[in-house]
């Protein structure tokens, strides 16, 4: 199994913001702080971090996908305090450099998240914070229950992830990984993403699963986790069900913080 066999959908990544989609971090930022954002993708959240720390601050976005970085450099407005670098979470070269080292929705795609957390801890200054937001995919839920065909797709998605050693309970396992990396004052903060029918963000937030099907569906079919027919049926039934029946979607998430002593 190769580790770089997944790319998230640009529609999902592009609409994210610091304030909505990395809320705990937003509350920690102050002008003048230096921040490393690991798995920054196209920088939609990273640019919010740069604004929050202001011109006296320093922000570096790191991603292992050069296409994401190219998109960040091309499409984002320029900020003198913000730069993007190619790199892997598990082999960051920074030592004792940043006030805050963060990642959002990234370690869920890493087969060795322990190595990534250790490298992130090393990149933090003494007294600095590591702030990691991630999912417990096994606890994501819908009310009422989705069509059986979509549930079949979702199980295939979990099985495909597990076969790649991508943790379906990443958020739950972060505190132990942080402690093993020598971080102290480790705390886990509930950060579920809840969206209800009638709210402005409901159509966009529930289209996440259409975008997941579009971005990784071919790999599920290739790997034998479901057929193309099953995938397309799940997609179309889910679309109709979201428009007519879905009341509430919960993405189970935690932000886990730890201090480098
Ligand atoms: C789901 S996106 C999340 C992007 C953004 N942080 C957000 O919350 O919207 C995950 C990103 O992490 C990157 N990524 C995954 N594993 C990585 C690793 N080991 N090192 C660096 N980047 C990684 C992917 O290329 C992708 O851009």
Image: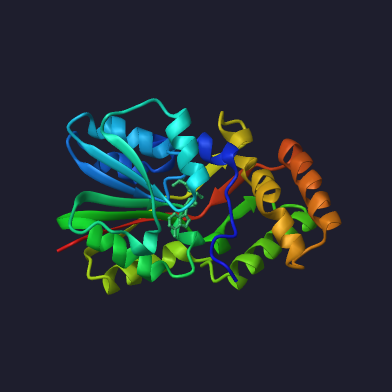
Asked if residue 159 is positioned above or below residue 257 in the image, the reply reads below
Asked whether, in this view, residue 190 is left or right of residue 14, the answer is left
Q: Residue at x 46, y 30 (%)?
A: 74
Q: Nearer the viewer, residue 220 or 22?
A: 220
Inspect this view and state whether residue 40 appears.
yes
| Residue sitting at the far top | 77
Residue at (78% x, 63% y) in the render: 226
Is residue 130 toward the left or the right of residue 15 in the image?
Answer: left
Image position of 12 (left or right of 214): left
State the image coordinates of residue 213 (x, y, percent, origin top left).
70, 50
If the image is split into quadrants, where does the C terminus sit? bottom left
Question: Residue 132 appears at what percent x and percent y?
Answer: 36, 55
Picture coordinates of residue 107 (x, y %)?
44, 60
Q: Name the one closer to the observer, 131 or 38.
A: 38
Dividing the picture into quadrants, the one containing residue 260 is bottom left
* Quarter of image, res 171: bottom left
Q: Is residue 224 above or below residue 140?
A: below
Q: So how many labels did they put on this image? A: 0
Quadrant of the rendering where the N terminus is positioned = bottom right
How far across and down, in percent of the image, does residue 92 sit?
A: 32, 59
**On screen, 218 above or below 79?**
below
| Figure coloring | rainbow
Judging depth in this view, the residue of 22 and 113 nearest the camera is: 113
Which residue is found at the position 45% from the left and 42% from the top?
Answer: 69
Is residue 151 shown to the viewer in this render? no
């Amino acid at each position: 199994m190769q580790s770089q066999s997944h790319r998230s959908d640009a529609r999902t990544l592009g609409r994210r913001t610091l304030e909505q989609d990395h809320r705990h971090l937003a509350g920690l930022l102050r002008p003048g702080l230096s921040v490393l954002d690991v798995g920054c993708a196209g920088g939609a959240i990273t640019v919010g971090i740069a604004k929050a720390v202001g011109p006296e601050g320093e922000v570096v976005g790191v991603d292992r996908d050069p296409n994401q970085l190219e998109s960040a450099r091309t499409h984002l407005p320029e900020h003198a305090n913000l730069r993007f670098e190619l790199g892997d979470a598990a082999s960051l070269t920074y030592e004792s450099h940043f006030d805050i080292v963060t990642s959002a929705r990234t370690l869920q795609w890493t087969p060795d998240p322990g190595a990534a957390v250790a490298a992130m801890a090393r990149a933090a200054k003494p007294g600095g914070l590591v702030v990691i937001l991630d999912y417990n995919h096994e606890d994501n839920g819908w009310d009422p229950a989705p069509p059986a065909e979509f549930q079949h797709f979702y199980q295939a998605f979990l099985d495909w992830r597990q076969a790649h050693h991508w943790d379906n309970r990443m958020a739950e396992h972060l505190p132990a990984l942080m402690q093993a990396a020598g971080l102290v004052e480790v705390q886990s903060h509930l950060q579920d993403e809840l969206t209800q029918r009638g709210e402005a963000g409901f159509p966009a937030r529930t289209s996440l699963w259409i975008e997941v099907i579009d971005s990784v569906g071919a790999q599920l079919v290739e790997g034998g986790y479901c057929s193309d027919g099953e995938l397309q049926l799940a997609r179309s039934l889910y679309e109709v069900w979201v428009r007519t029946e879905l009341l509430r979607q919960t993405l189970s998430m935690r932000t886990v913080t730890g201090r480098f002593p």
